[in-house]
Amino acid sequence: MIALTVAQIAEIVGGRLADITVDEAAERTITGTVEFDSRALTSGGLFLALPGARSDGHDFAAAAVESGAAAVLAARPVGVPAIVVPPAAAADANAGVLEHDVDGSGAAVLAALAKLAAAVASELVAGGLTIVGVTGSSGKTSTKDLIAAVLRPLGEVIAPPGSFNNELGLPWTVLRATGTTDYLVLEMSARHPGNIAALAAIAPPSIAVVLNVGTAHLGEFGSREIIAATKGELVQAVPAAGVAILNADDPMVAAMADKTAARVVRVGQSATADIRAVDIDLDDLARPRFTLVAPAGSVEVQLAVHGEHQVGNALSAAAVALECGATPAQVATALAGAGPASRHRMEVHTRADGVTVVNDAYNANPDSMKAGLQALAVMARKNGSGRSWAVLGEMGELGDESITEHDRVGRLAVRLDISRLVVVGTGRTMNAMHHGAVMEGSWGSESTMVDDADAALELLRAELQPGDVVLVKASNAAGLGSLAEALLDAEPTVRPRGEAQDERGNRDGGA
């Protein structure tokens, strides 16, 4: 974060000082990081006293200061130097609350955090910072990682770890930027209309990327049209001097060109795209190779991430880099070295016995399920030496469409000729997935339902054979990431692809 005194922060957020004098607050500067986890604090940092599901950050304020925090941002006095913002201060920030069910104190601290991040972002933009915002129903995190990778050769980049994309994670990321940061890449998610507009108001992007409009959180939005309108809030936040990068292959995204005052750059495989991918091919781990065609020239691109769906993500990243001054050759080089950077998103490992495990268990919706299953089918077909296993858990927040969408996933697994489907969990949705597979192909015992991750692990350990490829995918709440890790822990040696010519696998992280 840029250097600010405790007094300056109090003025920005509209808070009052507690357990620190005015003179001390004017002299004490925040020189460390801003953290909501007291264990992550650095000396001179600012601690955010937020209530959590199991504990209240206010209870850790004293320990945070003992560990080196210069002050605490809180909703009530905590016995150590603090900036206190009353719950009433959050009244105008309710539209920005996305995922956290917080009481008045939590909302107050989040509102203050948003004000602080907005002030810092404004000052940094005035000094030359470029803010890039990314949204979409799926692919946000992997695209954010690719954008960060292609921008790093051009300057200093700040991007969030994993999916820090809500009312807490986005301002936390903004406050990572300093006066030497050239590019700030922000992922923006939504659960309700107005959420993305609220996030974009904190850190207005000069470059906006919209990937797709799918059915993630359909149960909360009610329709794809409402989802599209919410994603469109990002391009509406871009000024006329900025750029909106839109997926030409998604009609709902392409239509957002009429919603923005910014210049529009279209990406995709469509002939209408300004930056296109042609001659796409996949290797034995479903890593795409294609020709990138852009006004600045054409170049061959080999991706280090997995799945054909990553082509569109890479095109969006390429468009951002080209807008920032990169050459096509620089883009190709950066993409070739950009393996997955966020955990449990198409992490591909090969065990010493030749079993390949694809850990894509961080999140799942109908679109990402389709992409994961298609990648699994390619890996199994190109490897040619084993079976394909789809170990699938529940997709959350689909509302009235949940039964239908789980049924479709089961049927898709059959159509893609996946060898074995293991449905993890009980209840109507998982029954629908299993039933869809059975009805589509009359698989019988080839589609198996198990109660939980432990039962799935027992089944897999008993039946996996060398050369098999296993996809583990579900919404994060299903907890299947630990199942995928347990499959790897069962083997003493996990070797990266490339160590030996005949090995199958790649040790990367995220998707």
Image: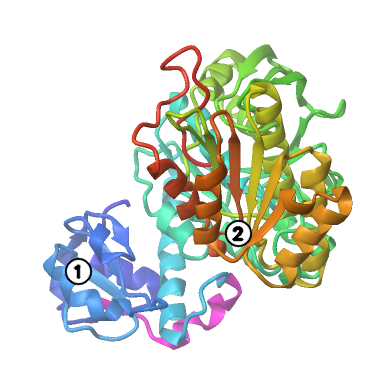
Name which of mark 2 and mark 1 comes first in the sequence: 1
Quadrant position of the C terminus in the picture:
top right
User: Which residue was labeled with disc 2?
Assistant: 475
Q: In the picture, residue 36 is in which quadrant?
A: bottom left
Residue stretch in magenta: 82-96
Q: Is residue 61 left or right of residue 388?
A: left
Q: Amino acid at mark 2?
A: Ser
Eye-nearest disc, 2 or 1: 2
Q: Identify whether 344 is placed above or below 191.
A: above
- Secondary structure of the residue carrying tag 2 is loop
* Magenta stretch, main secondary structure class: helix
Mark 1 closeness class: few <14, some 14–19, many ≥20 residues within 10 Å: many
Q: Can residue 56 be seen in the rendering of this structure? A: yes
Residue 20 place in picture, x, y as percent: 16, 78
Q: Identify whether 353 is placed above or below 162.
A: above
The one nearer the camera, 111 or 414, is: 414
Residue 152 place in picture, x, y as percent: 45, 29
